[in-house]
Image (cartoon, rainbow, N blue to C red):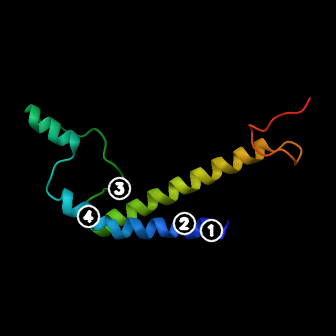
């Protein structure tokens, strides 16, 4: 993998870690959008029918680790899709990408 991409990924992870405390400053003790809407409408939240395997927002370390896991999963999926698209797009070595103009 190109060192440029690794450097960009590291910068994004460090930026995420640096800005994570602001999440807690602005959201601590507040409902999320759906919870607030239900509260305003006078409805209860009811029981959950599914429990997520990971929690988020419980503490900064857990939030960072779950965010990092999500970042890695998305990066791997995007890398795989782009790799497949690149392989399918190259026909005879001179064309690049699926939208390259075709000759007669």
Q: Which residue is mark 4?
A: 22
Residue 74 left/right relative to 81 = left
- Mark nearer the N terminus (3 vs 2): 2
Q: Secondary structure at mark 2?
A: helix
Count of picture labels: 4
Asked if the residue under mark 2 is in contact with the one under mark 1, i.e. CB atoms within 8 Å, the reply is yes
- Mark nearer the N terminus (3 vs 1): 1
* Residue 49 x/y as whole percent: 28, 38
Q: Which residue is mark 3?
A: 54
Q: CA distance from mark 3 to mark 1?
A: 31 Å
Q: CA distance from mark 3 to mark 4?
A: 21 Å
Q: Which residue is mark 1?
A: 4
Q: Secondary structure at mark 3?
A: loop
- Mark nearer the N terminus (1 vs 4): 1
Residue 101 left/right relative to 3 = right
* Residue 76 x/y as whole percent: 58, 56
């Amino acid at each position: 993998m190109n060192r440029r991409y690794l450097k960009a990924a590291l910068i994004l992870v460090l930026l995420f870690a640096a800005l994570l405390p602001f999440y807690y400053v602005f959201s601590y003790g507040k409902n999320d959008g759906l919870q607030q809407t239900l509260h305003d409408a006078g409805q209860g939240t009811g029981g959950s029918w599914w429990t997520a395997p990971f929690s988020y927002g419980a503490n900064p370390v857990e939030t960072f680790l779950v965010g990092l896991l999500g970042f890695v999963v998305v990066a791997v999926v995007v890398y795989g899709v782009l790799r497949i698209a690149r392989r399918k797009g190259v026909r005879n070595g001179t064309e690049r990408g699926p939208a390259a103009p075709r000759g007669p």
